[in-house]
Amino acid sequence: MMIETGGTVGSAQKISNWLNESDAVRYQAYSYSYPHKTAYREFAQPVELKNIWAQEKRDALFLYVHIPFCEMRCGFCNLFTTSNPEVSFEQEYLTALERQAERVRAALGDAKFARMALGGGTPTYLDPQDLENLFDMVHRVFGIDPRNVPTSVETSPLTSEAAKLAILKERGIERVSIGVQSFVEAEVMAVGRSQKNVEVERALDLVNSFRFKILNIDLMYGLPGQTAESWSYSLNRTLDYSPKQIYLYPLYVRPLTGLEKMGTTDSDIRLELYRQAQKELSEAGYQQVSMRMFERADTADTASSGADVLNRFRSDELSRDEFQSGDATPGRPAYSCQEDGMVGLGCGARSYTSSVHYSMRYAVGQKPVREILQNFIDCETEAFGFADYGIRLSDDDQKRRFLIQSLLQMEGLSFAEYERRFQSSARVDFGSELSEFVELGLLEITEGRMRLTSSGLEWSDRIGYEMYSPNILKLMSQHEAL
């Protein structure tokens, strides 16, 4: 099928060139969200949230709550979080979070929520009473009961304690996601994570004992010293716990992280390990949903129908595979990241409407992170009703967001869905770019859809990046990392 050339000028030669270069070109950075957070800037004037949301569809929103605390800072982590804060600081943050929640709820007006997630950081870093209070606050302010609204919570091996997991179970949490990364202690130690297998095994056994509907386990490939044999060991140990979902992340060494400071370089066997995992997980009965997400075939009906509200629920890194749409049921409307908005609470959370994305400031270094957190704590309640940092999406950016989030899924882009939403054709709007991907065997067109080929799936992160607009790339290049 021919794709018309029109709209944005493509980068055919550039794409063809990087296909022939080393595998390091394949792995530049995660393509999660669009626009990237480093494209955000201070608004000329603060904008009232009630005005931002006034024209938005608000009957199936997603609530994300960010808890920016961890027991340790992993060497690969560039998320907005701080480790081992003072108890007083933690309490002040939760107090500010409640003030923000009340102001945001007032600005939203008549709104209903179809999904919720607690991420970070590590929400289960909170002590049991604070965790209880957090759920009480969300229910009081937003009317959200996890028994009726599919909810995901992140945890870690060290913070997966019986008292906290009992709270999650009693509250009706549907999905628990735990970052393991590797079952080889030397590999996790090499990325600055002091984690013992005995702790991991205790945590996984405990989580499974509560019989949550969905257990997700995170793994990473390309860790220093990792081999095909050690990777297979981690995959097989993961399968021992029968998770319904497994997320696999290639290791990236990112600015200001511990790994960058240590001088760690990217692995050159990530593609080999990715292909190995594809094969081993397929043989174990897992279906691939995206480059990162795999789910057990025997639970696909429940897992994909809205329950897998995300693994990487730290709203600065969100991918469409973490936002599956589902059929509405009584009291449980379907949520679609392509149609519905996300309300982010907490310092480090991002909020999405169709034309405006906004958040607090972003940093990686511990000093600027603490300064931003302190500003959040000191913020006047009235100010929580305004957005002063983010980005306004042009028509082109809205189309690119839809295109990227669709193409990076196995199901791909529906031309009819694109045309319904934008009253234009993706094949015209992005003709030259898409044509080149098709000619290179990275995309294929069948039955009104465009999908990544098996080769294209391997290039997901780079393909996403190549679809960023020149303006977004310019803003990203000018971002000053903190």
Image: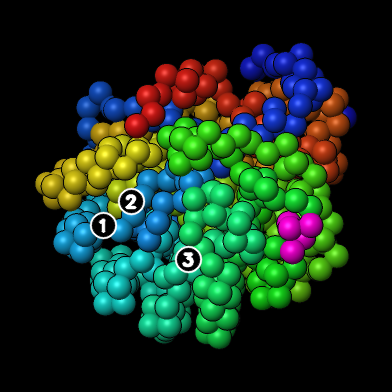
Quadrant where the N terminus lies?
Answer: top right
Tell me if I can see residue 345 in this picture: no
Q: Which residue is mark 3?
A: 156
- Measured as percent of width and height from the top left, residue 15 is found at 74, 21
Q: Residues within 10 Å of mark 2 (few under 14, many from 20)?
A: many
Q: Secondary structure at mark 3?
A: loop
Query: Which of pointers 2 and 3 lies earlier in the amino acid sequence?
Result: 2
> Of 229 and 25, which appears nearest the observer?
229
- Quarter location, residue 224: top right
**Are the residues tagged 1 and 2 within 8 Å (C-beta)?**
yes
Q: Name the amino acid, label 3.
A: Ser
User: How far apart in space, not on screen, are marks 2 and 3 (Cα)?
Assistant: 15 Å
Q: What residue does disc 1 label?
A: 85
Quarter of the image where one finds residue 355: top left
Is residue 107 a member of the stretch shown in magenta? Answer: no
Mark 2: secondary structure = strand
- Asked whether residue 127 is in view, the answer is yes
Q: Quadrant of the C terminus?
A: top left
Residue that label 2 marks: 82
Q: Is residue 420 left or right of residue 314?
A: right
Which label number is shown at residue 34? none
